[in-house]
Amino acid sequence: MEKLWGGRFQGKSEEWIDEFGASISFDQKLAKQDILGSLAHVKMLGHTGILTVEETAAITEGLQTLQAKLQEGNLQFSIENEDIHLNIETLLHQEIGAVAGKLHTARSRNDQVATDMHLFLKDVVQEILEKLHHLRQTFVEKAEEHVETIAPGYTHLQHAQPISFGHHLLAYYQMFTRDYARLTESLKRIDLSPLGSAALAGTTFPIDREFAAKELDFSGVYANSLDAVSDRDFILEFLSNCSLLMMHLSRFCEELILWCSYEFQYIELTDTFSTGSSIMPQKKNPDMAELIRGKTGRVYGNLFGLLTLMKGLPLAYNKDFQEDKEGMFDTSETVLACLTIMDGMVATMKVNKSRMYAATQKDFSNATELADYLAAKGLPFRQAHEIVGKLVLRCTQKGGYLQDIPFEEYQAISPLIEEDIYVTLQPETAVKRRHSLGGTGFDQVRLQLDHAHKELLTEN
Ligand code: ARG
């Protein structure tokens, strides 16, 4: 079969080589964007008088027909036509004849493919932002239900200090809010048009790049044609932002998995988000959370794949770039799916308040309270720390916890300790009293919630 670029070739192409070089099996995902890009390009060619009114009309109509066929699922792509750009051009030729050959005036596949990907990512990022907004809303709603739910707070996965479970959830709200901000910020660079940079050097035709950019709803154009066709930072930024987002999702999944284990039983996931075992009838596994944690790995992989691909490439276009697409598609699909699953999982999870509370009672997570109590009464904190440390040791040897030590014993240790120590040692007191800005005190958690509500409202 004759190639669209076949002019300077004498040898025949071979199918197995064609197959290796082709990208149509995956870049057909860009069909919609490719046609949109061509529609804007031809409109610009007409607007600038590079093509006649008739030529412009014929090509536009042909492209619109292809667009309709694509929507109906009636476009047939072939490996002989290598990639989505040559496939669409060939189909256009079949549709309208030789005039189709004028579409590629003042354009190259190099600026074309970059344009397609900018258009694609713009849509995907918007979609991710919507889902992320919703997920943050879900975290806020859950947190609202659990402002006064007392849970153990951990460091080193050891009981550290009791906290409000709402506070814990709002920590994730903050991470997702940063993800949201990063993705929003990245739109500035995604929302730029490389179109009109042609192969690498621009063109001798009197094109109007800004006109075409406006047609495509881009807010600006790349300033340098070499950069425009060889920049993949916008994809890398996307992959890196998605990696961070997945890392956050994955950390929460890890907690969910722990929390629904027999040892914790802090939460229960609904049946919808759990699966059973083919051999052990009792099993209810948190598969969806595990899968999100697992899929994080492939998103990181996509980032590293493209970073590695880029590091040695000279300007401008290199065919290596063709390898930039699958990771981008895969990441988009993965992140969108994970956000949906996570949202449903969090919205429907059951929180076992009494288990969480119980976990803060038979432990030493109130040790800081006793040390702070002494320090507040004037004892240097280091000394207070030492005294409480010894008491904890004594408890672990004799049994019991700080709240079980009889009052006489406390007084013998320090006359600074009064009857109110038992209230001080209660987990709810410990949480409630942490009024410091951003702390776990109920009032502070409510403040965070107010702020989150306002933040979410301004995004709508
Ligand atoms: N399929 C190619 C890609 O994805 C399109 C650009 C091809 N340009 C070229 N000069 N071979 O990168």
Image: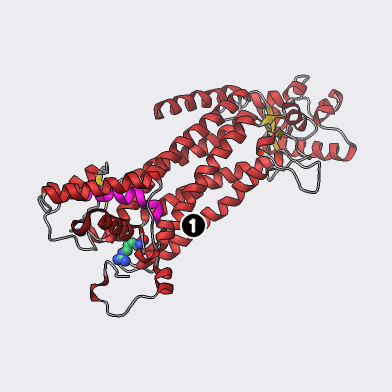
- Where residue 373 appears, as percent x and y from the top left, is 70, 27
The residue that label 1 is drawn on is 302
Residue drawn at 23 percent across, 63 percent down: 200
Estimate how packed mark 1 is, as few (under 14), some (14 to 19) or many (20 or more) residues with alpha carbons within 10 Å: many
Residue positioned most to the bottom:
11
Q: Nearer the viewer, residue 325 or 70?
A: 70
Find out whether residue 37 is within the magenta segment: yes
Across and down, in percent, residue 311 comes to 40, 66
In the picture as drawn, the residue positioned furthest to the top comes out as 419
Residue at coordinates 16% horizontally, 49% vertically from top-left?
56
Label 1 SS: helix
213 vs 382, left or right, is: left
In percent of width and height, residue 116 lies at 33, 52
Q: Quadrant of residue 359?
A: top right
437 or 302: which is nearer to us? 302
Q: Which residues are magenta?
A: 28-41
Q: Position of residue 191 (x, y in %)?
A: 31, 45
